[in-house]
Amino acid sequence: MDTEEKLGFIRALDSAQAKTDKRIVNRTSNYVESVRNYELVNSFGSELQWNEIRTAFFASSVASEAGKLELNMDRKYGTVGYELVKETDPNEFGHKVAKGAAELLSAAKPPSGFMNVIVDPDIAGLLAHEVMGHASEADEVLRQRSFLSNAVGKRVGSELVTMVDDGTIEQAWGSIPFDAEGTPSSRTVIIENGVYKGFMHSLETAGEFHAKPTGNGRAQDYNRRVFVRMTNTFFEPQDSTLDEIIGDTKEGLLAVQMMSGMEDPVGGGFQARVLKGYLVKNGQKKDLVRGFTLTGKALDILKTVDIVGKDLTLSGGTCGKGEEDWIPVTSGGPYMRAKIIVGGG
Amino acid sequence: MSSLESLASTVLKKAERLGASQAEVFILKTHGRSVYIESSKPRVADDKSETGLGLKVCLGKRVGFSSGTVNKTSVDEIVNEALSIARTTQEDPNFKSFPGGGKISGRLEGAYSEETSQIGLEEVVAKAMDTVKAAEKTRNVKMPLGMIRLADYSLHVVNSLGVNFSHKGTMVFSYFKSKAAVGESAGEGIEKEWSTSISKLDFEKMGNSIAEKAIATMKAESFKGEKNVKALIVPVELEGLLSAVEFATSAEQVNKKRSPWSNQMGAKVASDKLTVWDDGRHPGGIRSALADDEGVETSKKAIIDRGKLQSYIYDSYNANITGVKATGNGFRRGTRSIEGAFAFPTMCTYANLVVKPGNKSLDDIVSQIDQGVLVETFASPEVNAITGGFGCEVRNATLIDDGQLTKHVKHALLTGNLYEALKNVFDIGAETKIVENTVLPPIAFSNVTLVGQK
């Protein structure tokens, strides 16, 4: 694929944003591709060669009116080549991003307090990854840093909650054929119908736990330490549509698109910065509200999950162990409703 | 001529000979050592050396960048690739030139420590274990995770317009996490320290402090309800919030019209109490050097003076767009590790963001707060820098009632708008701390909200 075509895609993303609304004062459109070639030989007899091809693009718009600024953004990531771009209409994608920024200029202040929150797949994924996922990395358990150390076999969520880490999903950004120790990636069930099942392992932790390695020994680079890391981590879908979830909500908040979050394997706390949301009243989606933050204890949140959507969506990103050692991962889930603390508009 | 200077000169000539209108060569030689502590014991140690090259070329207004570690074949590949990228890239109408060379004068203190450069891994392990032992003297506290990473490095920048700058430095970053547990209750303590000299870090004190934090977090109760409060925030958590100041005063964001302070020069953007400098030569500052990573001379300049916006920061690219002189704010170097910095093009960012300290101790400030909270640990102190909105999960804080620290709380959000909060700064502490590339005292804000469960 020649560079000119890739540049053409980025220009189309930019132009669509520019055309959408005259209040858009800044646009950013990025395209990133990478090919990493791996060779691994170890004393267990592995002699492996593979490559990982990743492609991603990202668009953000800033809208301004009367001295007020608002940001909206969207992105697509995949362990795949230029096909990711070919299946996207840049005009539609760019237009949607810019329209979102302009709409936020007239968004209301979000509510605060403890309430019913319908989280979108992006935010559901953050909960899966940052809290339940990091605390299910066996090296954290080994170091006694996980609030889930003694949770195997216990109920940690409502029956609607099933969560897995699966490094084998085709084209997902967090997928890997082998981990950094040469173990093939696999599917690990972490929570099944609300009951906690177990941990993800590297060779080292599998040895300590007398368990099977799960292909989760990953490193940022050749010069970094291997830790137990996630791949694609998500809640499994159930059977409700988003309309049914909203229709079933008397009063609450629909939270849309996460901006960032932070792990807490020791305390089990959850923090998600959310880009925007909608008030929900008497089963109807109402006013758009500005960005806010969700927080609470993960187990309290999961135990209050009372309705789960039917469509699984995965979002790519990067994950640090603590605050560094960055690797590509995916997280996601369906729309889910739970009781969560909201603040910070 | 040093070996780095000689290599830089060779690459520059090669790029120019092959057609570059201008070229900029950045060479970085690093020697890093890391020690990881896991479950209270040293688990992994490493010692690694690397020399890398970042090359930026322009063909008129077409700019190309390439990088790689250095060996005989890679230098040719990097030069050819940078030129190839420049040929295929669209013209950048905003690009004018790399920075011109000029005399760089002045003195620099505390950027390089011979002791840090020479220290062996065994000694680093011993220092890490000082922290572990000190922390674990406290009952019910363990140290599941810790890390010390240090490096000595030399860099050299040359360009076609006469820039020719060398710098030698050292940096240390340490990061420890302790855990206190009794029955089902658990709490985590976190300590992060930055320095250019390992002898300036007190590893035993770090251990004592992190044990106290873990115990406090374990004992903390979930905060209930919602309260308008005054918040006193310690430097290590403040740094993330003040990233909004860095964003708003970056010429890159101003030029892109993303900064909320784009048309605010001279305006009141903060309380009279707040003065902020960018000081490229702050003694012991993590990024301190006589010039930035483009070879432009650094200085100390007021960004906010008693609440009024005085200046933006400029790398050469953004200075050319605005038509002003670059302020020595083009950096590649990170603040937690130096390895691999050659692979990044320069970004418009602070050398060292320094907040002018006040004259009160933390206790004195606490004693003057009627209803408030002393925040010691956020999950992740982040701000939406475009809107200023923040809502940070509190992992360890102490409520303040009538000037007294009362009970520890967690599972709450501290919320507000950072740009408004800057106008509500009512006190600033005397004692500063280096956090990443900032030098910060504790700062007290009024009119923020603490939100917990019902």
Image (cartoon, coloured by chain):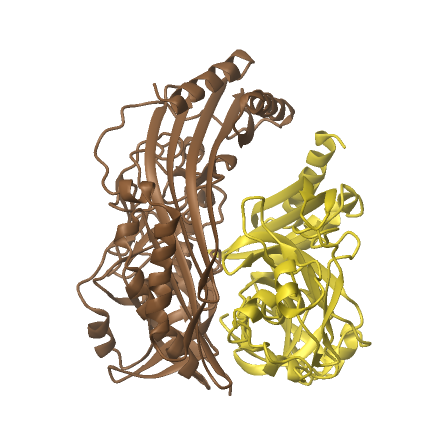
Chain colours: A yellow, B brown
**Which residue, as the protein is rendered here, is positioned at the far right?**
A239
Q: Position of residue B82 (x, y in %)?
A: 57, 25
Image vertical order of residue B271 relative to residue A345, above or below: above
Q: Which x, y percent locates residue B419?
A: 39, 61
Closer to the camera in the image, A226 or B218: A226
Residue, far left:
B359
Q: Quadrant of residue A201?
A: bottom right
- Looking at the picture, tell me which residue is in the foreground, B266 or B350: B350
**Does residue A272 appear anywhere in the picture?**
no
Vertical placement of A129 versus A18: above or below? below
Q: Position of residue B327 (x, y in %)?
A: 33, 36
Residue A124 versus residue A100 in the image, above or below: below
Q: Quadrant of the N terminus of chain A?
A: top right
Residue A47 visible from this viewpoint: yes
Q: Residue at x 51, y 30 (%)?
A: B94
Identify the image quadrant of residue B281. top left
In this view, which residue lies farthest toward the top? B17
Query: Residue B161 location in percent, x, y?
Result: 40, 19
Q: Does residue A60 sit above or below B314 in this rendering?
A: below
Q: Along the line of sight, which residue is nearer the eye, A25 or B448?
A: B448
